Image (cartoon, rainbow, N blue to C red):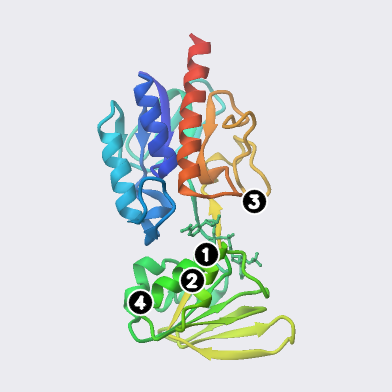
Amino acid sequence: MVEKVVIIGSGPAGYTAAIYAARDDLDPVLIRGFQTGGQLMLTSEVENYPGFPSILGPELMDKMYEHVKTQKCKIVDDDVIKVDLNNYPYKVYTTEKVYETKSIIIASGANAKWLGLENESRLIGKGVSGCAVCDGPFFKNKDVVVVGGGDSAMEDASYITKFAKSVKIIHRRDSFRASRTMQDRVLSNPKIKIVWDSIVEDILGDQKVSGVRIKNLKTGKSEDIPTEGVFIAIGHSPNTKLFYGQLDLDENGYIMVHDFTKTSKPGVFAAGDVQDKVYKQAVIAAGWGSMAAIDARKFLSEQS
Ligand code: NAP
């Protein structure tokens, strides 16, 4: 059996694509992956998704999933391990099954980046974390640091102050990249201090984190800051390994699209953070998802 459309991913882009494709009678197969829900599952409060003045990220994703379940959509909770985009119909391999399909919507999203220090990977789960929402509550009355200067760093720092005694944000420049509102929230929080113009050179500690060695890029001086927690919040990289050599990707690995959601292969569309390195917002990813489903429908109708 050849499917009309297979959707890869279960963030706002994948779920919206599934809703639109189902309503267009495309009988979509939605492969959610084992880590369902995308990045909003690791977010706390979301205050910028229309219709929801304040909602927790995982709760918003649950609501989207419930919506998808009302539609005629085959939901597969399995990981995609391989795709074949060099032969048509295309093939999408999961750990259990191979799906042949006329079109594909890729909505596999992006993941948090790490600093790449040896002690960072060694101490993950022992004080080093990439997820404030998951690990923040472990740092009650502790001193922690957050690395980064974007919205993620602001959000993480604010959230962790609910638990920690103090939070230092270590940022490599002398101004933040984050939105004004998020910056203001951080700058007015008495528990948060900013360490400007500094990078983390090393993470200290044997069995668990005991501090960070930072270097001031303006003075060249290094100093050790005692801390029990290091939260890394320095951005994201797209989940595109499956498509290396089969689709055009940019220098950072994002899927290159033209005419809105079209990739370099006919019938293969990309939606959300896997191709959007600029806006990276849930509401925008949802919009891309609907666009990709509409584009897939047009592609399929032109075929028949
Ligand atoms: P981002 O905007 O790309 O910011 C990454 C930050 O980390 C930048 O300040 C960057 O410094 C710094 N950085 C990057 N690599 C580094 C390294 N190797 N060492 C030290 N610092 C490094 O990423 P993000 O904060 O994850 O946000 C991504 C997108 O999601 C944004 O569009 C943001 O608006 C959105 N977002 C929204 C919300 C919300 O609205 N609730 C929450 C989180 C994220 P430079 O500034 O010097 O480049």
Number of other residues with Cα within 10 Å of mark 3, as a class: few under 14, some 14 to 19, many 20 or more: few
Question: Between marks 4 and 1, how big is the CA–CA gap?
Answer: 18 Å
Q: Which mark is residue 252?
A: 3
- Foreground mark, 2 or 3, reads 2
Cα–Cα gap, marks 2 and 3: 31 Å
Secondary structure category for the residue under label 1: helix
Are discs 1 and 2 less than 8 Å apart at CB?
yes
The disc at residue 167 is none
Q: Name the quadrant containing residue 255.
A: top right
Q: Earlier in the sequence, mark 4 or mark 1?
A: 4
- Of the image marks 3 and 4, the number of the one nearer the N terminus: 4
Q: Amino acid at mark 3?
A: Asn
Query: What x and y, as percent, mark residue 198?
Result: 65, 80
Query: Which residue carries the number 2 mark?
Result: 185
Residue 259 in which image quadrant: top right
**Residue annotated with mark 4:** 162
**How crowded is the residue under tag 2: few (<14 C-alpha within 10 Å), some, or many (20+)?**
some
